């Protein structure tokens, strides 16, 4: 299946829950009136776009309808598509790069697919011709270290690790030195799947970032927060809390192929000053894709 086909297939549930319902509404009403706007706003909220974002989109839609002097409800779909694209932006977000070494720290709560995402990230960078090293800085669970090693073997990259219970910042420090010694291009650092309510664990993340910055000015270049696309608006709450404490530079939204809540991407963009950089569309190594707003919107409305 083509890249475009895979994206369309993965967004099927979101498309049915958002665009499909909008099409049903347009067929039912035909005429543009206040009641139609109210129902449209409700559809956007149910698709996990978020209340504030839904209200703003509908207000902007009303303005465009008035300026263009539209009276046929069938025209609303195209105008809404334009409004969503204007909100998300036209260009894919670029990844931050270091030189000659790029350091990526990956954070997120348990169960969002963080370790799997790291394996796919390693594959992504390796496919770009880069030499990649992984660091097992989730030292709270032996299983986490083992999982990362399995992914390292699968992708064909080395993993720097310490014993269970070791200082995570020390693992990150050693990984950075090993990356330099091996002339790696990118080092990806796993961290514990910590609950955002546990202050001491958040402080540990800050410590990792400080140690990296002292060893390599400018590091980490990316702090990627992995969020579960099926969690909808809860993902925005997690992003806000992690962003406040760990300096998140980008979001990886996973499991979009299994949810009708893909509209949360729109809410994230509107609510937070944190860009979505990758989206997860399935279990295969190639199913982690750079987020392209234009392709996303086209696949959603196609």
Image (cartoon, rainbow, N blue to C red):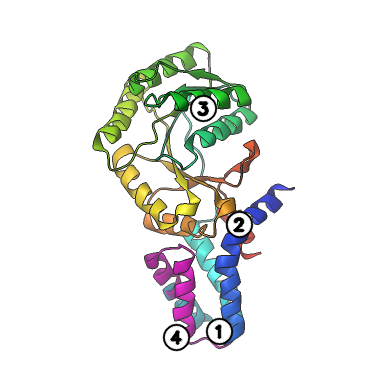
Dot label at residue 70 = 1
Residue 74: which quarter of the image?
bottom right
Circle 3 residue: 147
**For the magenta stretch, what is the residue range?**
30-58
- Marks 4/1 in contact by CB < 8 Å: the verdict is no
| Position of residue 213 measured from the top left corner of the image (x, y, whole percent) | 34, 25
Judged left or right of residue 27, residue 36 is left
Magenta region includes residue 51: yes
Question: Badge 4: few (under 14), some or many (20 or more) residues near its Cα, within 10 Å?
Answer: few
Please identify, in this view, whether the residue under mark 4 or under mark 1 is nearer the observer: 4
Please identify, in this view, whether the residue under mark 1 or under mark 3 is nearer the observer: 3
Vertical comparison of 6 with 25: above or below: above
Pick the quarter of the image with the C terminus: bottom right
Comes first in the chain, label 4 or label 3: 4
| Position of residue 89 measured from the top left corner of the image (x, y, whole percent) | 51, 56
Q: What residue lies at 56% left-to-right and 79% top-to-bottom?
A: 25
Q: What residue lies at 59% left-to-right and 52% top-to-bottom?
A: 257
| C-alpha distance separating marks 3 and 2 | 28 Å
Instruction: Let me know if residue 142 appears in the view.
Output: yes
Query: Secondary structure beneath disc 4?
Result: helix
Circle 4 residue: 34
Query: Secondary structure beneath disc 1?
Result: loop
Magenta region includes residue 32: yes
| C-alpha distance separating marks 4 and 2 | 29 Å
| C-alpha distance separating marks 2 and 1 | 29 Å
């Amino acid at each position: 299946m083509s890249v475009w086909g895979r994206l369309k297939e993965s967004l099927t549930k979101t498309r049915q829950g958002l665009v499909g319902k909008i099409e049903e509404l347009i067929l039912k009403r035909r005429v543009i009136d206040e009641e139609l706007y109210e129902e449209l706003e409700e559809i956007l909220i149910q698709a996990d776009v978020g209340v504030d974002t839904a209200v703003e989109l509908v207000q902007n839609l009303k303005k465009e309808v008035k300026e263009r002097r539209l009276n046929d409800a069938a025209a609303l779909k195209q105008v809404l598509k334009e409004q969503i694209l204007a909100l998300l932006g036209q260009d894919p977000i670029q990844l931050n790069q270091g030189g000659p070494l790029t350091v990526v720290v990956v954070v997120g709560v348990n169960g969002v697919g963080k370790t799997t995402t790291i394996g796919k990230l390693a594959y992504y960078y390796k496919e770009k011709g880069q030499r990649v090293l992984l660091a097992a800085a989730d030292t709270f669970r032996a299983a986490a270290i083992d999982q990362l090693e399995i992914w390292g073997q699968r992708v064909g990259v080395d993993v720097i690790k310490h014993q269970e219970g070791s200082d995570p910042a020390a693992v990150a420090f050693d990984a950075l030195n090993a990356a330099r010694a091996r002339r790696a291009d990118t080092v990806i650092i796993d961290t514990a799947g910590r609950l955002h309510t546990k202050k001491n664990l958040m402080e540990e993340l800050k410590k990792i970032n400080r140690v990296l910055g002292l060893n390599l000015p400018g590091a980490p270049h990316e702090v990627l927060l992995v969020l579960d696309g099926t969690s909808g608006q809860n993902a925005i709450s997690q992003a806000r809390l992690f962003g406040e404490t760990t300096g998140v530079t980008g979001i990886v939204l996973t499991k979009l192929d299994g949810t009708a809540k893909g509209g949360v991407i729109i809410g994230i963009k509107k609510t937070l000053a944190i860009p979505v950089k990758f989206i997860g569309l399935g279990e295969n190594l190639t199913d982690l894709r750079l987020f392209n707003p234009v392709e996303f919107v086209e696949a959603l409305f196609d």
